[in-house]
Image: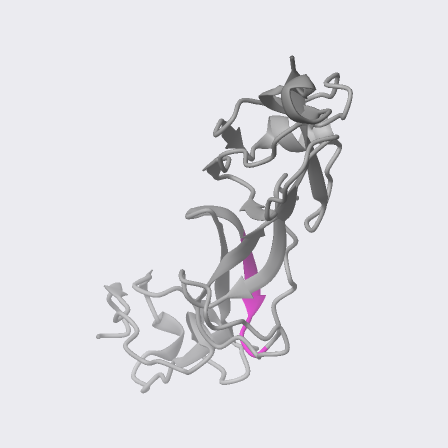
């Protein structure tokens, strides 16, 4: 380019790992005259001379993207070579947060002591609360095994196998099973029919005041003459 004619500077084709190109300068340390990429310039000051423009570099940044339930929940800009700051998602009823993973299947956990040198996608792992459901004969006889249930799922309760009778022989008073209740008196917050559907959802944990995994629920057999 003639130093007496305006012209457009070339597009930068240099690269530098971990850095971003920020423009040109007549001094390597950036203390000279600065020019933008593709800037139209007239270098009249340097008429007849060869002018060297030095690429200027800024520390590169990378994006750390946090995914929750398949959607972007947050992003974070991290300077090249620095560490990401762990982002804490909002609590979800019925689930425990188990950390960030580098794959959507949540099999490989991410180490936040890792120096970031490229864009990173992280996926939150959530584990559903689990509960034990136990069955009480409530004056009857027999036995039934407990069952394990998980938040967010629906279950069919097992068929009642308890029986209840009062007395012996022809004088015995036999009772009919009428369902399950969370109270022996039948006045509890939840009741279910024999082989009824148990929904382990927000209504379930709210009524029972369950705020963590591992809690147990006793269902009492209800009897009618």
Q: Main secondary structure of the magenta part?
A: strand
User: In front: 203, or 15?
Assistant: 203
Front-lying residue, 198 or 130:
198
183 or 67, nearer to the observer: 183
Quadrant where the C terminus is found in the figure:
top right
Looking at the image, residue 211 sits to the left or right of residue 30; the answer is right
- Residue depicted at 70% across the width and 27% down the height: 168
Residue 159: x and y in percent read: 49, 34
Determine the residue located farthest toward the left in the rendered image: 1
Identify the residue at horizontal 53%, vertical 31% (top origin): 198
Residue 181 appears in view: no
Q: Residue at x 56, y 32 (%)?
A: 201
- Along the line of sight, which residue is nearer the eye, 166 or 176? 166
Q: Is residue 24 above or below residue 50?
A: above
Rendering quarter of residue 24: bottom left
Give the x, y percent position of residue 97.
62, 54
State left or right for residue 57 relative to residue 200.
Answer: left
Q: Quadrant of residue 53?
A: bottom left
Q: In the image, residue 188 lies at what x, y percent?
A: 74, 21
Query: At 35% from the left edge and 83% from the top edge, which residue is drawn?
Result: 51
Marks counted in the figure total 0
* Position above or below: 156 against 64: above
The stretch of residues the image draws in magenta is 75-81
Furthest residue toward front = 170
């Amino acid at each position: 380019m003639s130093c007496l004619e305006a012209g457009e500077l070339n597009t930068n084709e240099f690269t530098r790992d971990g850095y971003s190109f920020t423009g040109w300068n007549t001094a390597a340390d950036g203390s000279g005259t600065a020019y933008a990429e593709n800037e139209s310039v007239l270098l009249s000051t340097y008429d007849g001379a060869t002018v060297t423009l030095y690429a200027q570099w800024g520390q590169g940044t990378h994006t750390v993207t946090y995914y929750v339930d398949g959607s972007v929940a947050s992003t974070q800009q991290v300077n090249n070579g620095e560490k990401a700051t762990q982002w804490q998602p909002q609590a979800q009823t019925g689930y425990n947060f188990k950390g960030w993973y580098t794959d959507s299947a949540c099999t490989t956990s991410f180490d936040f002591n890792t120096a970031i040198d490229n864009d990173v996608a992280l996926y939150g792992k959530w584990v559903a609360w689990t509960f034990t459901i136990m069955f009480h004969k409530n004056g009857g006889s027999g036995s039934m095994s407990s069952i394990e249930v998980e938040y967010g799922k629906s279950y069919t309760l097992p068929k009642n196998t308890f029986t209840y009778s009062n007395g012996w022989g022809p004088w015995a008073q036999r009772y009919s099973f009428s369902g399950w209740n969370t109270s022996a008196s039948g006045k509890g917050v939840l009741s279910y029919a024999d082989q009824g559907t148990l929904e382990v959802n927000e209504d379930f944990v709210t009524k029972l005041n369950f705020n963590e995994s591992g809690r147990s629920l006793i269902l009492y057999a209800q009897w009618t003459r």
